[in-house]
Image (spheres, coloured by chain):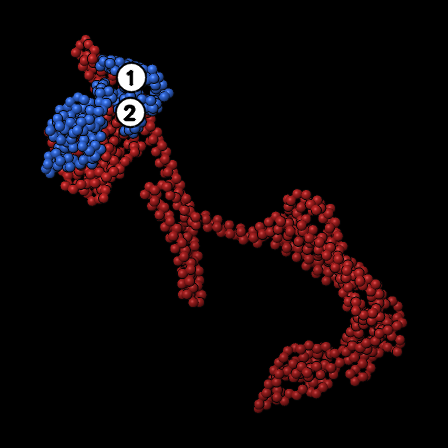
Amino acid sequence: MHTILICDDEPDIVSALKIYLEAEGYAAVCTCSGQEALDALDRDREIRLVLLDIMMPGLDGLAALQKIRSRSNVPVIFLTAKSEDTDKILGLNLGADDYVTKPFNPVELLARVRSQLRRYLQLGGGMQREGTLCVGGIRLDDERKEVTLDGEPVSLTPTEYEILRLLMREPGKVFRPDAIYRAVWHEEPYGGESTVAVHIRHLREKLEIDPGEPRCIKAVWGQGYKIE
Amino acid sequence: MKKLRGSFAAKLIAVLLLCALAVICVLAAVGTAYLSDMGAYSVELREAEDRALENAAGGYLLQAGESWREGNTQPQFLNTAFRYAIVSQEGEELLSTYEGEETRWEGTQQLYPSFYVVDHRAIERPELTVPPTPRPVELPEDGDRVPATPTPEPETVSVIHVFCYDDGQEYDFRSDAELVRWRNANALTVKGYVLRESPGTDAFDRELSRLTTLYGYRALLPAAAVLSFVLGVLLFLFLLSAAGHRDTGDTITESFVDRIPLDLFTLLIAGAILLVLVIAFNMGLPGNIVGYTLGILLMLAVGLLFLLWCMSFAVRVKRGTLWQNCLVTRLVRGTKRLAVRSLRALPLLGRWAAILGAILLLELLILWSGEDGGSVNWCIQAFVFTPLLLFLLWHMRRLRLGAKELAAGKLDSTIDTRGLFGELKEHAEDLNHIRGGLNAAVAERMKSEHFKSELITNVSHDIKTPLTSIVNYVDLLGKEELGSENAREYVEVLQRQAARLKKLLDDLIEASKASTGALPVVAEKLDLAVLLDQCVGEYAERFGKERLELVLLKPEEPVPVLADGRHMWRVFDNLLGNIVKYALPGTRVYLRLEREGERALVSFRNISREPLDRSADELTERFVRGDSARSTEGSGLGLAIARSLTELQGGTMTLTLDGDLFKVELRFPLAC
């Protein structure tokens, strides 16, 4: 079983997280400050993931993350009360793998934990095959017409599959809805562009833990869609 | 030197010395002049004595002649060593007091008739004949202009009309030469003798002894004059430099004399000097030692007064009060101040009325005088009125531009008050003050808004921590074996409300940041048509769930605007979310995109589920919603956030309520 390090200055939250994680079969190491978390990481080499609060007295989450990154690439999920975009971007840029805003939905948190662990432990690479597209935790095997999310198969409709394949072929490129429509339906949209948005939304519901805040399949508002 | 400068005793001594030197200098100069007049510097003492005797005898000679002319035939000066004889032109001895005694000096003097030229006049008298010398023909008293015997051809003769004192007659001469001839012909010769044996000590002996004495000092006198003059000048300069110094310091102290206005002081001194001189001349100082002493004393008094003036002048120059302390300056300044003050006291209108009135009066006077009034009027118009008006207009323009900027909300530029004057300057300063006040108010407002936003954000973050525990433990509670069905229901309520609280907090943070402009805007070129497609796609299923039919109307071509996509999504998200929440199920929702001149217009129209009894403004104000909406989900901040974010990106949002029709219009400037 994997060991997960919890770090939050609020003991109630720490014990709640412990209960959730242990219910899922993980072992939990509880700390209450950034410094304790660093010490625990040094002591216990078996820690596979860190849940890190940002706003803590003393060494805060961002500073602790920088220290963790200087010695290990263990997945770190930020737990943060700050919900603004700038704070999220700052955390991700510093090297966090994911973030969850407080108050969090336990189901979502556990899904993210699972996702990060699978990606970190099982998909270490080397399984790259010809005709396989990988972005984030999403893997599209064009030969088998198979899509997996963090190793788990996902069932998509043919249209969703086509759109996903189009986006994944050029990660980061922004596709206009009418371009997607032409490429997938092979006909002029004539006002049917919003259909694309509906399918993208379905894709997100299947491939994203929180469809409202997608991490991979992103809308570039007023321009189109992209995957990254 | 500094010590001397400040000492009163030194100054007193200097003044006394200066007086003495002045006397010495004058006396020595007079003596030198006398000696040089007598030729003592070029000839022997003997000859000088002759000249001195001649000098002294000259006076007697003149007196004797004049006495004779006045008709006094008695012999004079018999008690002196002077003797004389009066001889006519023909050589006839008319009077003589000389009886062949031995003489020290002999001399003659021509005594001419005394007359004066009355005028040069023209006389119409062809037969006028000037009588041959010695006497011209006597003209009749009144016959000078009217000829006695009229002639057929009158001729004008220019003559010199002369009045002779000696006989009280008037004569005419045709030329200067004729006059001179007449004068010479009537001259008398006065012969003078100074006897060697004088009846007593008289003027001649005194003259000779004075000459002999002075001759002894003939080398010393000019030297003394020059030396005393130089020393006097030096002392004078010292007094000037010492004037005003009371101690060894450099401070200049005014005495009461120096406080008298300069022009008044100058007049007083000049008056005093004049008075002294008038007294001296009127007294007719006797020619003895008392007279000389008195004369010298008066002269010293004049000198001292002048010295006083010079020293006071020096003090004034040193203190820099030369012109300030002047009656004329004061008067001019006072008048100016009075004029300015009285003009100032008038209100703006009154002042200009006074100025214009004065100009009009001037023009009227010119008009009355009738002297080429047109051109003077034109000059006044051209050189007074027009520049004045242009000057005023120029200033008005500055004020106008400043006020315009102020009205446009440009609070960073101020009106340049340089060159402005009077009321206009005050007006400009007032405008600047208003601007300053507005600036301060705006800055204060921004500060407090930012503070409020910070406070809301921080408090919200702090609230989230306990909220997290609540959410988690309620969730855990839900997983526990609960005794009753009710308990499970209650836990669900708790979960729902906790989620709502979270949403409320997030909205609160966003609303406060958006309204204070604390959110960064990364503007990009967006296609509103694409954005609308995306939003409609996102909401398609939720609309379907509420049985709302979405009608999307948009142009074929792209509608580009400059905006931040994420903020735009939030705006549309909020508005569409609102529609889903508050639109009457089963109705149509119209979403329309069009170009409206230089702007893009997006309108959302739907039928409200509940009657709307609030005004449109109230709806977008924070925490105000239609009453009936209170029970449903949402923070009530959606519209406020949408409006703030729209405005943050340079757009406008208008809300229209028409019965149950709820219409939102967004306008953004088109990007080219």
For the C terminus of chain A, give its image quadrant: top left
Residue that numbered label 1 is attached to: A47
Image x and y of residue B398, in percent = 37, 49
Residue lying at 18% horizontally and 24% vertically, measured from the top left: A149
Q: Is disc 2 in contact with disc 1, using a CB cutoff of under 8 Å?
A: no
Disc 1 secondary structure class: strand
Q: Mark 2 — on which chain does it sit? A: A
Task: Say whether residue B627 is left or right of residue B443.
Answer: left
In percent of the image, x 31 and y 18: which residue is there?
A8
Chain under numbered label 1: A
Q: Quadrant of residue B672?
A: top left
In this rendering, does residue B580 appear at all? no
* Mark 2, residue position: A96
Q: Which residue appears at 72% of the width and 57% of the height?
A: B230
Colour for chain B in the figure: red
Classify mark 2: helix, strand or loop: loop
Res B635 quadrant in image: top left
Where is residue B515 shown, x and y percent of the image? 29, 32
